[in-house]
Amino acid sequence: MLQVGEKAPDFKLPTTGGQEISLGDALQKFRALVLLFYVLDFTGG
């Protein structure tokens, strides 16, 4: 588990355009970065 202030490990995620991008690539390409993990659509209840 990460602690406050630690850097996240590099990982890859699919983009909305069907590509794949790593955290490291995104940080180099964009000035600001916000990741949103939204799982409510896939849960019951």
Image (cartoon, rainbow, N blue to C red):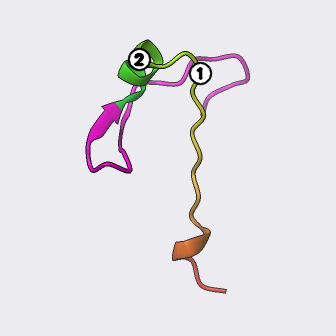
User: From which residue to which does the magenta span run?
Assistant: 1-21
Q: Can you identify the residue that label 2 sits on? A: 29
Q: Is 16 located above or below residue 43 in the figure?
A: above
Residue at 67% in and 86% down: 45
- Label 1 sits on a secondary structure element that is loop
Label 1: which residue? 32
Residue 10: percent from the left, percent from the top?
40, 25
> What kind of residue is marked 2?
Lys
Image coordinates for residue 40, horizontal then vertical, percent:
61, 70
Q: Which mark is residue 44?
A: none
* Res 25 → quadrant: top left
> How many numbered circles are shown?
2
Badge 1, how many Cα within 10 Å: few under 14, some, many 20+?
A: few
Q: Residue at x 32, y 48 (%)?
A: 17
Mark 2 nearby-residue class (10 Å; few <14, some 14–19, many ≥20): few
| Up-down relation of residue 15 to residue 29 (above or below) | below
Quadrant of residue 41 within the rendered picture: bottom right
Q: Is residue 42 left or right of residue 19?
A: right
Real-space Cα separation, disc 2 to disc 1, in angstroms:
9 Å
Label the magenta part by its dominant secondary structure: loop
What residue sits 73% from the left and 23% below the top? 4
Q: Residue at x 46, y 24 (%)?
A: 9
